[in-house]
Image (tube, rainbow, N blue to C red):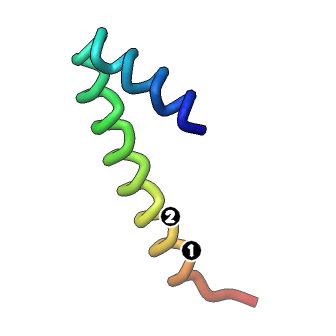
Amino acid sequence: MSQESTRLREFLEENPKWIGVMFSALLLLSQAGSAAAANGGSMTGP
């Protein structure tokens, strides 16, 4: 796992714009997960 972390860190050091892209994707996924959880919890049916 540390080898993958090192490769990711090296990639981000070489391509700093991807830090923002990854942060935005993580933020979007966390918001979508929260919305899906809220929607699924409020549904009642037969």
Above or below: residue 11 compared with residue 9: above
At label 2, the amino acid type is Ala
Q: Which labelled disc corresponds to residue 36?
A: 2
The residue sitting at the top extreme is 14
Give whichever of 17, 3 is nearer the camera: 3
- Residue ID for mark 1: 40
Residue 25 in the image, given as x and y percentages of width and height = 37, 37
Real-space Cα separation, disc 1 to disc 2, in angstroms:
6 Å
Q: Quadrant of the C terminus?
A: bottom right
Residue placed furthest toward the right: 46
Which residue does the image show at 43% across and 54% down from the upper left?
Answer: 32
Q: Is residue 44 left or right of residue 25?
A: right
Secondary structure category for the residue under label 2: helix
Q: In the image, what residue type sits under mark 1?
A: Gly
Q: Are marks 1 and 2 in contact (CB under 8 Å)?
A: yes
Q: Indicate the position of residue 29 as horizontal and vertical percent values.
A: 43, 48
Q: Residue at x 37, y 44 (%)?
A: 26
Q: Quadrant of residue 45?
A: bottom right
**Label total for image:** 2
Closer to us: 41 or 10? 10
**Left or right: 41 with respect to 29?**
right
**Quarter of the rendering containing residue 21:** top left
In the rendered image, residue 16, in percent from the top left (x then y), is placed at: 23, 17
Q: Identify the residue at image location x=29%, y=38%.
A: 23
> Which image quarter holds the N terminus?
top right
Q: Is residue 19 above or below residue 11?
A: below
Give the residue at x 30% y 9%: 14
Instruction: For label 2, count other residues whose C-alpha is less than 10 Å away and answer few (under 14), some (14-19) or many (20+).
Output: few
Q: Where is residue 8 shown, x and y percent of the image? A: 44, 25
Q: Is residue 44 above or below residue 16?
A: below
Extreme-front residue of the structure: 2
Residue 4 - label: none
